[in-house]
């Protein structure tokens, strides 16, 4: 009977520890948090996939729109979040192609899941916490958007020049005047409109811009010296000065006033 004591003791010990063993098993068996859904149902011709979580209503934003959104971004590979924002505002043209394409599908109040392949994201270079060649998944809620007013367009008849200087600068007199012409000692006050020579779209407009001739580019200084005070001229950039990155740009200038240029700073 003495030999049974160790067995009885072992049985008692097992009974005593049973709650601890089973408790640990119960903890291990608790369900883990569900992984976020990282798939999309619809695929576009460009390679973006998306799912409509909640439909919106109204107009869709265009490529030049400024949007306000709530969003979160995850890596498709493991679901880890790399970015999120509430009430974020930005131009559609300033984001990665896949995100921009997705935003242009949406309407205010809508919420979409966007599955963006690496080719429409950050590509082979990656960015910050986003590794190279990473597919991305965004959940985006479009709160609102605004579209800028269309840019003015110069009529075709008012885009060209009919005279040329020895340097190749083209010009046309739109409004003649009898005032004095500028010198290098002057500061010109001008209104001007800078526009694309081919399309006529105005890229930039200024009023009462102060331009010391001594500090202007050689071509613009030459242009201003052609103009009598009070006149309006159109100037055309020589075609040889245009590049693919900087297409030909023309400018309409009104010479409002001429004043002594401020002294140059040492």
Image: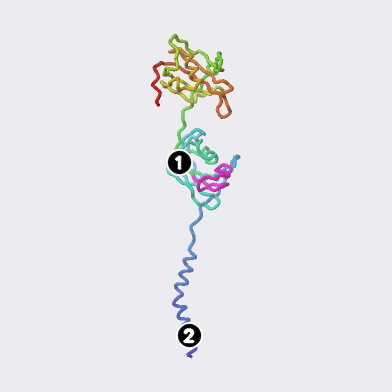
Identify the element where label 1 is drawn.
strand
**Outermost top residue:** 178
The residue stretch that appears in magenta? 116-139
Task: Residue 101 in the image: state x and y as whole percent.
Answer: 54, 39
**In front: 93, or 148?**
93
- Residue to which mark 2 is pinned: 6
Residue 69, disc: 1
- Residue 121 within the segment the image draws in magenta: yes
Residue 231's image quarter?
top left
Vertically, is 259 above or below 13? above
Q: Where residue 85 sits: x, y (%)?
A: 44, 44
- In reply to whether residue 16 is colored magenta, the answer given is no
- Identify the residue at image location x=46%, y=30%: 148
Q: Nearer the viewer, mark 1 or mark 2?
A: 2
Position of 262 compared to 234: left or right? left
For the view shown, which residue lies furthest in the front direction? 266
Residue located at (41% from left, 21% from top): 210
Instruction: In the displayed orientation, state which residue is furthest to the right.
Output: 45
Q: Is residue 217 above or below residue 25?
A: above
For disc 1, the neighbor class at 10 Å (few under 14, some 14 to 19, many from 20) is many
Q: Can residue 42 be seen from the camera position used here?
A: no
Residue 95 in view in this figure:
yes
3D distance between C-alphas at marks 1 and 2: 71 Å
Q: Main secondary structure of the magenta part?
A: loop
Tell me the number on the disc at residue 109: none
| Nearer-the-camera pick, 79 or 188 | 188
- State which quadrant residue 211 falls in: top left
266 relative to 79, above or below: above
């Amino acid at each position: 009977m003495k030999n049974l004591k160790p067995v009885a003791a072992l049985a008692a010990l097992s009974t005593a520890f049973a709650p601890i063993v089973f408790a640990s098993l119960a903890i291990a068996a608790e369900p883990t948090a569900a992984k976020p859904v990282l798939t999309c149902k619809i695929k576009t011709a460009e390679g973006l996939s998306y799912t409509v979580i909640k439909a919106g209503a109204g107009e869709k934003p265009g490529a030049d729109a400024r949007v306000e959104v709530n969003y979160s971004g995850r890596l498709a590979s493991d679901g880890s979040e790399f970015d999120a924002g509430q009430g974020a505002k930005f131009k559609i043209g300033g984001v990665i192609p896949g995100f921009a394409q997705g935003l242009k599908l949406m309407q205010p109040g809508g919420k979409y899941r966007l599955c963006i392949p690496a080719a429409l994201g950050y590509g082979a270079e990656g960015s910050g916490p986003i590794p190279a060649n990473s597919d991305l998944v965004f959940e985006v809620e479009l709160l609102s958007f605004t579209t800028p007013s269309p840019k003015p367009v110069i009529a075709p008849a008012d885009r060209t020049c009919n005279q040329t200087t020895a340097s190749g600068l083209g010009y046309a007199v739109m409004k003649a005047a009898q005032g004095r012409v500028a010198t290098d000692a002057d500061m010109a006050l001008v209104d001007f409109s800078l526009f694309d020579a081919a399309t006529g779209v105005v890229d930039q407009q200024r009023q009462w811009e102060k331009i010391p001739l001594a500090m202007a580019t050689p071509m613009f200084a030459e242009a201003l010296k052609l103009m009598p005070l009070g006149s309006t001229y159109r100037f055309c950039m020589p075609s040889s000065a245009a590049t693919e990155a900087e297409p030909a740009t023309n400018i309409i200038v009104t010479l409002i006033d001429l004043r002594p240029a401020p002294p140059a700073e040492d």
